[in-house]
Image (spheres, rainbow, N blue to C red):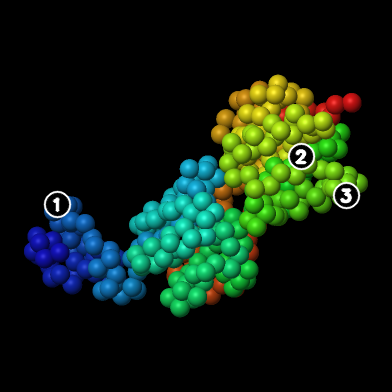
Amino acid sequence: MRQVATLAGVGTKTVSRVINNEPNVAAATAERVWHAVRSLDYHVDLQAGSLRRADGRTRTLGLLVGSVDNPFAGAIHRAVEDTAIKREVAVFASSFDDDPERELRAVNAFLRRRVDGLILTSVKRHPDYDASLRAQGIPVVYVDRRPLDATYDSVTSDNREGARKATEHLIRHGHRRIALLTDRLDIQTAADRQQGFFEALGHAGIATTSTPVITELHDSGAAQHALARLLASDQPPTAVFSSQNLLTVGALHALRDAGAQRSVALVGFDDLPLADLVDPGVTVVAQDPQEIGRVAVTRLFARLEGQDLAPAHIIVPTTLIPRGSGEIPARA
């Protein structure tokens, strides 16, 4: 910093004020400082600088998602980053794979790095680190899953309604034996989607006791194996609702392996890359992860700026996209 100050012909305090965007610095002076920064390829040490900065900020956010290689999580990440970068804020992203211990380690790592705020997906509705967050006064917005504590902001899809729409769509095409492929039911999204599925069946007078429901499916391979067994059973389903995008991939493999892709209907929750290019195209209930990420980070910045906001649960609607697989009629 001293070299920057010497080259710009100013004091080190002025350099600090310029790179921290503090007020009352003449435009010409700021330009000389930034020219010196660029000439010397000077990189600000945010960790050290935060101790001196008037607002105590590090200009970093922590983002925790299920898995960064899942397209849904990746889209949330991109939306958060696109908004943050305009404010010259960096985003640290981490995956926790629905493992509560890994989640705790990731959040603790964010806190050690003194991030200004957190956008979190949590496997628990009352996470173990809640007391630490409150003690440190760090603003938090939850995404995808809503915590039990209603004093936190959260942004989620309308999971129950989306699942209900998907199931009703299959019922309208004559299906009565519809299989549900889902994740662990202690995960809130999975439980909400199962509830919407059962609500649609109940409204149509379809007994849930005879409905094939396969839970504890964590990835495409598990879904493929589970559906293959159902298709080979004495009473195979005429339709499938897969409640997560990776499970839909597994269902597609199972249907194709069994030669049933044109006879067994499929609706997936969450869209897939190239879903419109397979034959038949995959009918989905599409979430809007870009909007979830944008709303979440906008809400977080509003809190960082001191806006007096009441805690809110913001629900982002889903959209049913018919492409062919969900419109296959039930066999006679």
Work out which quarter of the rendered image holds the N terminus and state it.
bottom left
Tag shown at residue 203: 3
Tag shown at residue 179: 2
Q: Is residue 259 left or right of residue 118?
A: right
Single out the mark in the foreground, 2 or 1: 2
- Do the CB atoms of the residues marked 3 and 1 lie less than 8 Å apart? no
Please, is residue 315 above or below residue 320 in the view?
below
Q: What is the three-letter code of the residue carrying label 1?
A: Ser
Quadrant of the rendered structure where residue 51 is? bottom left
- Neighbor class of circle 1 (other Cα within 10 Å; few <14, some 14-19, many 20+) is few
Is 229 or 4 nearer to us in this picture?
A: 229
Q: What is the three-letter code of the residue carrying label 2?
A: Ala
Q: What is the three-letter code of the residue carrying label 3?
A: His
The residue indicated by pointer 1 is 39
Give how far across and how far down residue 167 sits, in percent.
78, 42
Label count reads 3
Is 241 or 44 nearer to us in this picture?
A: 241
- Neighbor class of circle 3 (other Cα within 10 Å; few <14, some 14-19, many 20+) is few
Q: Which numbered disc flags the more N-terminal residue, 3 or 1?
A: 1
